[in-house]
Every structure is written in C-alpha cells, then in structure tokens.
Amino acid sequence: MFGLNKKDSVLFVLVLFLTMCAPFLLNPFPQGSELAQFNAGYPDLMQRFVIFGIFAIGFNILFGLTGYLSFGHAAFLGVGSYAGVWMMKLLTMNVIPAIMISVIVAGLFSVLVGYVSLRRSGIYFSILTLAFAQMSFSLAYSVLTPITNGETGLQLNLDDPRILGVSEVNGSIPPPNLFGLSLRDSAEMTFGNWVFTFNTGYYMCAVLMLIAFYISIRIFRSPFGMMLRAVKSNQQRLNYTGLNTKPYTLAAFVISGMYAGLAGGLMVAMDPLAGAERMQWTASGEVVLMTILGGAGTLIGPVLGASFIKYCENIFSKINDNILHQWFAFMPDGIEDVIVFLVHPFVGKGWHLTLGLMFMLVVIFLPGGLVEGGQRIGRLFRRRKPDAASDASQTKPAE
Amino acid sequence: MGLLEVKNVNKRFGGLQALGDVNLSVAENTVHAIIGPNGAGKSTLLNVLVGKLIPDTGSVIFDGQSVLGRKPHEINQMGISRVFQTPEIFGDLTVLENVLIPCFARRDGSFKLHAFETVMHEREIVDMAEQMLTDVHMIEKRNLQASTLSRGDKRRLEMAMCLVQQPKLLLLDEPTAGMARADTNNTIDLLKEIKATRPITMAIIEHDMHVVFSLAERITVLAQGTPLVEDAPENIKGHPKVQEAYLGQSHE
Ligand SMILES: Nc1ncnc2c1ncn2[C@@H]1O[C@H](COP(=O)(O)OP(=O)(O)OP(=O)(O)O)[C@@H](O)[C@H]1O
Ligand SMILES: [Mg+2]
C-alpha cells in the first residue's frame, strides 16, 4: 500500500485507526465517575499527543538512525513557533502560511546548527547542539526582544496588520482557522454519560502527524535510511566504501529540524503564542526521553513515548493531596497520612520525579523502550513461529 | 608506468620510522604481494594509500592522479577498495545490506538523497548484491545480522563488499588471517576466479606463504619500513635478505 510493505502497511493502518478514533479511545470512562480523571480525550491533550509525536518522529530520524544525539532540538521547535506567530500577526489567521514558514525557518536554522555541530561526533556533537540551543534561548530573552517579545512571549494583538485577513473581529482577535474553518470548533457526541469531543484542530494535527509518520517509514526503508543506519554502525567503513557521511548526517539533521519546526508551527496554530522557555534545555531533553522511552530507532516508538509521557504528565501533575486522601481514605488515619506524605513528592509539581524513575526503569530493564516491552509481551502470548513474519519484507533468494 | 606508483614515501610516528623511503610500483592487472615481519609497516603503507594517513614526504599516484590529500571516500570513488586487517563491516545491518551499500556507492556516487525510493524495490542493485553473496557462498546468510557472523565469514563479507564495487585496485590486508584451512583455500579460489573473469589489480598483504605463492605474480618484501627486494615469486623464496628479515637477525 502506497509503496509500503505488508508489515509497515499494517502498522500505518493501526496508527491511522488510533489517531482517527482517539476521541473515543481516550475517553473510556463516563463523565462524573471516579475514573473520569484518567480520561485523555480532551482536545488540548490530544493535540499535545500528536504534536509531540511529530517532534519525536523527527528526532528519531536523526538519533534513532544515525545515533547522533542532539540536545538542542527544542531550539528548532521554538524558532518555528516564533516564525509561525509572526505569520499570524502579519499575514493571516489561516494557519497554513504559519505552519509552512515554521518548517522553512526551522529547516534553515538547522542547516546552520547542523553544519557546525556535525564537525564533531559523540559527546562533542551533543554539547555543541546544546550550546546552540541555550544561545538561542538567551538571545530570545535579551537581544532579540524586538522579535521575540522577551519574557512575556510573542502574542497576537488587536492592532496586528494581518494584511491578508482582518486585524480584529468585534473587538477580539479572530481565532486561528484553516481556510475559514475555526480550529477551536468542536463537535460533541453524547452516549448516556459518555461525552466525546471531536476538535477541528486535533484532526488537522492528526492528519499532519500521519503524513509525517508515513514519510518517516519511507525514509526508514529507503537507501538513504540504510546509509544513516550504516553511519551509526560503522562510519569508517562507510567512508572507505566511497560514501561521504557528512551530507547524509546533515540531511538527517535538517529533516529532523524541519519536523521540530512543524511541531512548533502546530503549537502556535492551536494556541497562538510563543515563549523562549520552549527552547530551554529541559524541552530538548524531553524529546530525548520520549524517543528513548518509546524505543529509539523503531518506527512507532517515538509516537508511543510522546503520548505516554504527555499522558502521564497530565495525570500525575493533576493529582494533589486532596485526591490522595480520597484514594487512601480506606486506610487507618495514621497510616493514610504516612502514605500520602510518601506519595506526595511524586505527584503534582513533583511529577518529574516519577518521570525520572520511569525513565531509569526503562533504560535498565527495557533498553529497547516500550516497543521492546510490547514485543516481549507479544512473544509470551504466541510461541514464536519460525520467522514467517520477518520473511515478508525480504525478497526471493537468488537462483 | 604502473597503475599505482608510490615514490619515496616516508612516515614517522614520533621516533619510529614506520615507512622509510618506500618505492613501489604495482603494474595493472597483476597480483602484487607485500610481505614482511610484524611491524614492518605493511598496514601503514595501506593506510597511506586509502587516505587514512598522510605521509611526511613522497608521492602516491594512482591511475595518473595523486591520492595524497584526498578524503577516503574520494579515493574509493577513484577505484581503490580495501579489506582491513580486522574486519570492518556494518555489524548492526544484515549481511545483504552490507553488500547493498557498496552497490549504491558504485551506482550513485558519494552522496544521493534517495529518501523516497525503497531499498528492496531497486531490483538491479539487489540482484547485484545477491549475486555477489552467491559467489562468496554466503547467500543463505543474507538476512543474518552481520555482527553475529564468525570471524571467517566477516572477512568474506568484507571481501564481497569490496569486490562488488569492481575496484580497479583491491587492497587486501591479511584476508585469510583467522580462517580455517578450507576457507583459506576457498578464498584463494575466489580471488583466482575474480582475476580470471575480469581485469583487476590486487595488492595483498599476507603472512600465509601458501596464499602468497598461490596468487602473487610479484612480491615486495618490506622490513622496518623499507622495501628489501622486489621480484618474481620464484626468486623470492631462497633470497638471503628475505630469510634474514624473517628470522629477525638484522643488526645493521
Ligand atoms: N597510528 C599509529 N601511531 C603510532 N604508531 C603506529 C601507528 N600505526 C602503526 N604504528 C607503528 O608502526 C609500525 C608499523 O605498523 P604496521 O601496522 O604498519 O605493521 P604491519 O606490517 O602491518 O604489521 P602486522 O603484520 O603485525 O600487521 C608498528 O611498530 C606500529 O606499532
Ligand atoms: Mg598489519
């Protein structure tokens, strides 16, 4: 299908199904029930799933294939966001130009950063990318304030020109739209106590993520993708085989930078503001965690990792002491207080502690990430048949 | 003039003269063996030829063009492929992919952004790689991960990766070291067969005299970085200087 082999087609259709039906799948619990807090079918959260999915898919093309670990990819996301907001200030609230300019600007910036950083490999490469990102972050706060609006962040104003659109509608800023279709619009569907929300913005992001995912599958199966894996495996050998590794790694770097730009553009399409904190090293680190947690170098891993982290962030950071007391109310008072006291640092603002622990557990016990976990469970269920599945992607033996 | 002309090449590592005034001419379509005791500078000489090292002085002319100062990938694209002393393969990739990469390098040059083609749909490339694997008797291992191969198989794979490029000059650094007798004989047969089917020049470093005398048409003996003698195989065997170098008696 679309030039994909059978296994990849199945994977793609699965992701297609999951993203299209997400409003149902993520809202399994009825409104008002105890468990409703574990629902994730809100537009805002679903948008974050797919936007960070795109970011991680792109990051995986660089890190998963070539092994070059960038610690500065949030810079491209941030630059893309600023460029996107400017488009919406100057041109129109239609998000298409904003998204396109985000990708282009992030791509150009990544050519510069990649060209310099790729002069080194290993830890030195990581440090160079980190340095670039921190420089961008500081610049956005200081010298570049006229462009970035410093600490406040870049926002839309009523008096923005928007030469292809309108500056204001009835005294307020018009909502971002896709050829007139407001991205904030949602349709709701009610079944008894269940409420499902279908948000235009989410579906636009989801379609773009599917395209991004499809492109990444094609890259993985292409000669170019094979060369990138060869870079990771033995760069020396690649050189002595007549291949110039520099343009290959630079191309991978720029492609992943453009994915980051796309994610940044979509963020402002959903919520038109951009702040420097988007470029901070913690944001760069987050995409590294997502990719490794999900399974670096696998197709689906980064998407899983991104959704997993964003879901946990949402759940864990919402929990406060009141909720904890409710949960442990069945226990004797003294013990309840002790338990709540012990759990407290891991939830709410402290949820990063939980994230850190999960990350350590995965790296130690599941170096292949969630994907490896899934494979292990799968193997437990069906006793491994002799490699029928892996043969599907191969070709006939020569005579 | 030979396909490869090495003139007055010197290379020092600190106080060690690894190569001292090396002159070597490899004639087109011959198998030229370079032998010598451990540490004689044989691998260092190959490193100079493929652009891994830059000599202190001297010149290296291949096919009428200077090699010095060029990047390894440029030198390979000129037509020089090298099998290393310790196998250099893509351990994380499959055996077939290991051979596909040089096929792409040969067809598309040192860089091509072929991000939307599918490897397995490139029929003629896949056929070429599979034919090569058949020739080296590894076709049934084509889906194995290369790092899981035995040492002998790794060497054979690396040789296949170099041969499939159809280089003008093939450099082999101890291609049979670590191989069982039967595999060594297979390798000799393979190289003879390649030699018989199409024009190729080889420079081969080897400690195994059986291999050397089965293949070589010309032999250079290197000792302490300097060529002692260069002659036809039948004249090398009994040469007093060679015996001396190998027995390590030289005190001059
Ligand atoms: N990069 C290097 N830095 C310093 N010394 C080196 C380097 N490469 C080689 N040498 C030294 O140069 C000398 C020649 O080494 P070389 O590897 O060329 O020998 P060789 O003839 O290939 O030996 P062998 O038969 O053991 O492979 C050795 O003494 C070695 O230690
Ligand atoms: Mg050697």
Image (spheres, rainbow, N blue to C red):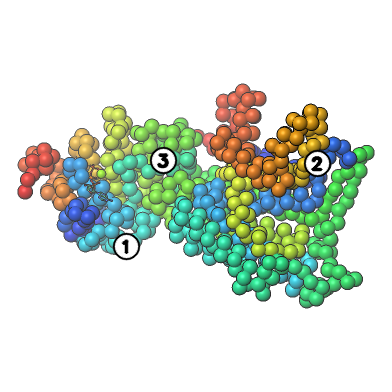
Does B71 sit left or right of A201 as displayed?
left
User: Is disc 1 placed on a helix, strand or loop?
Assistant: loop
Q: Position of residue A2 (x, y in %)?
A: 67, 47
Q: Can residue A207 be spotted in the picture?
A: no
Does B8 sit left or right of A49 as displayed?
left
- In the picture shown, does residue B207 fall above or below A386? below
Q: Nearer the viewer, mark 1 or mark 2?
A: 2
Quadrant, the N terminus of chain B: bottom left
Which residue is disc 3 drawn over?
Answer: B132
Which residue is disc 1 drawn over?
Answer: B69
Q: Position of residue B245 (x, y in %)?
A: 11, 42
Task: Specify the quadrant of the image occupied by residue B135.
Answer: top left
Please state the chain letter of the residue tagged with numbered disc 1 in the rendered image.
B
Disc number for residue B110 = none
Task: Specify the quadrant of the image occupied by residue B121.
Answer: top right
Q: Amino acid at mark 2?
A: Asn
Residue at x-position 79% and y-position 31% = A333
Q: Position of residue A268 (x, y in %)?
A: 73, 61
Q: Residues within 10 Å of mark 1 (few under 14, many from 20)?
A: some
Q: Are marks 1 and 3 on the same chain?
A: yes
Q: Amino acid at mark 1?
A: Gly
Residue at x-position 53% and y-position 35% = A396
Question: Camera-side residue: B176 or A33?
Answer: A33
Q: Residues within 10 Å of mark 3 (few under 14, many from 20)?
A: many
Marks 1 and 3, how far apart at CA: 32 Å
Marks 1 and 2, how far apart at CA: 71 Å
Q: Position of residue B233 (x, y in %)?
A: 15, 42
Q: Amino acid at mark 3?
A: Met
Residue at x-position 62% and y-position 27% = A379
Does A211 sit left or right of A223 as displayed?
right
User: Is disc 3 placed on a helix, strand or loop?
Assistant: helix
Which residue is disc 2 drawn over?
Answer: A322
